[in-house]
Image: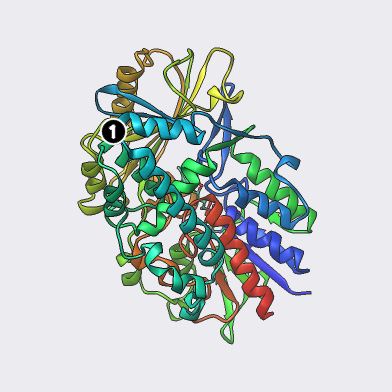
Amino acid sequence: MSNGIVIGSGLSGLSAACFLAKSGMKVTVLEKNDTPGGRVRQFQEKGYTFDMGPSWYWMPEVFERFYGHFGKKVSDFYTLKRLDPSYRIFFPKGEQVDIPAGEDALFSLFERFEKGSSVQLRKFLSEAAYKYKVGTEKFVFQPGLSVTELIDKEIVAGLLRLHLLKSMRNYVNQYFKHPYLRQILEFPVLFLGATPQDTPALYSMMNHADLTLGTWYPMGGMYKIIEAMTEIAQSLGVKIVTSQAVEKVEIENKKIRMVYSGNTGYEANWVVNGADYHHFEQEILPESHRTYSEKYWDKRVLAPSCLLYYVGVSKKIPNLLHHNLFFDGDFDKHAEEIYTHPEYPANPLFYVSCTSKTDHTAPEGHENLFILVPVAVGLTDSEAMREKYFNIAIERMEKYTGEKIQGFITYKRSFAQNDFIGDYNSYKGNAYGLANTLLQTANLKPSIKSRKIDNLYYTGHLTVPGPGMPPAMISGEVVANQIIRFS
Ligand SMILES: Cc1cc2nc3c(=O)[nH]c(=O)nc-3n(C[C@H](O)[C@H](O)[C@H](O)COP(=O)(O)OP(=O)(O)OC[C@H]3O[C@@H](n4cnc5c(N)ncnc54)[C@H](O)[C@@H]3O)c2cc1C
């Protein structure tokens, strides 16, 4: 039986481990932190349960499909609830727009802002559905190792329709005039870590995920996904060793033979690195065995980092929904401060998740708030900055919800760039990996296979298919299939 090591127990590492173990391999997962899950972590404090990373459960069929590979269903592990409204947007002057889950309500909402826009939306969503179908059936499962993968009848025939060379900004503007409608349709691109001007319109497939497939919530929180995946992994014999940071590898004849954590050596016929790609290549591999140089990494466009706040409040805030986007500032200016001229934003847009609207994540009569302010990578992280942006977010929330929040805060913890680096060895403190720009799409991403070491593979949000929970799970499957095929 082939012995393998997966480094990192994020979604991608756990997914790879499950597929490899199912094929009969003996798999050990080495995780630096004391719990599995990577960015999908959870903690409890003072009666509150906080998900530390993801809060949007999109593309539910990807999760269902994953569990299905192992003879399971989502409902074997958790109850999934579709949120309706999906989310609330606070526009300038505090105008609130709720995005409904049903098609008819969505069309009426669009008509409210722009006459005739429901007809346009129908066309737009039909094209988004096509892109989603081609994207999820043809692109995301490709290992990105050869251009021949892209020579597919449907991809070639539909090349113009996929709008790879048109920007999301121009594409949306072609359909809609009202600034709110444009912003609603540009919003999902933020998940991809680049501006709407730099994101190919191919990614309007995300509008299909958002507006048609919907926003869901696993009761018990996002950590239910990790519990489900670890249960599957362990049932297949995977050994998950936590508090075991990989520090060194031993290479012989272009192959990794041993992986070391402290003095403990783990024998390996193959290695999948699911930890930060840059960290493993630049800090663990000897220079002679790296596929990419530091210069290469420095030229990558990273998705943003973020300032996160986990906050417990001893009162209810009726004007919040489960998901709330504070788009009351200048979207383009904030994007410029993230991507073009990296600096702390003057007037940031931010996002608030209030899981206590749906789940028992706070004591009775309290709210559980998760506040996320996107910021550029590589800025200086300090307590003073964290405090400054916390106060900005709270003040704006008070203004738009009409509820006093300062004075009712019973718990508060922040998490920012230094924590991303300290907890996940994240390159430059990025939160979501690599931006999905055209030049960092598919085969143009860092390769899932090392070009210098024969038995070394990579998975996770810095390689194919990209950032987000569903892509990370798919990334694990793609890399596992490569190993299974060639061993
Ligand atoms: C704040 C935030 C919000 C997000 N929101 C959403 C959302 O709403 N919806 C969505 O779909 N996605 C969201 N994402 C993205 C999603 O969480 C990630 O894309 C995904 O979890 C990445 O998984 P991964 O396996 O690639 O990496 P990670 O989760 O980072 O896993 C890598 C693992 O490697 C470990 N590791 C690092 N170095 C070593 C070492 N030397 N030895 C051993 N182990 C090591 C780390 O501890 C970590 O556990 C969000 C991410 C963040 C940070």
Residue 167 visible in the picture: yes
Q: Mark 1 points at which residue?
A: 384
Quarter of the figure that contains the N terminus: bottom right
Image location of residue 74, percent across then percent down: 70, 44
Amino acid of disc 1: Ala
Asked whether 416 or 217 is in front, the reply is: 217
Left or right, residue 384 beside residue 202: left
Name the element at disc 1: helix
Q: Which of the 4 image quadrants contains residue 288?
A: bottom left
Image location of residue 253, percent across then percent down: 59, 87
Asked whether 76 or 83 is in front, the reply is: 83
Q: In this view, does 355 lie above or below 289?
A: above
Q: Which of the 4 image quadrants contains residue 252?
A: bottom right
Q: Which residue is drawn at 39% across and 30% down?
A: 109
Image location of residue 107, percent across then percent down: 42, 35
Image location of residue 266, percent across then percent down: 67, 68
- Label count reads 1
Quarter of the figure that contains the C terminus: bottom right
Q: Which residue is drawn at 52% across and 16% down?
A: 366
Binning the other alpha carbons within 10 Å of mark 1 as few (below 14), some (14 to 19) or many (20 upward) gives few
Left or right, residue 347 beside residue 298: left
Q: Is residue 416 above or below residue 259?
A: above
What is the image's colouring? rainbow
Q: Residue at x 25, y 37 (%)?
A: 179
Q: Which of the 4 image quadrants contains residue 332?
A: top left
Q: Residue at x 45, y 76 (%)?
A: 290
**Residue farthest to the bottom, as pictured:** 253
Asked whether 88 or 19 is in front, the reply is: 88
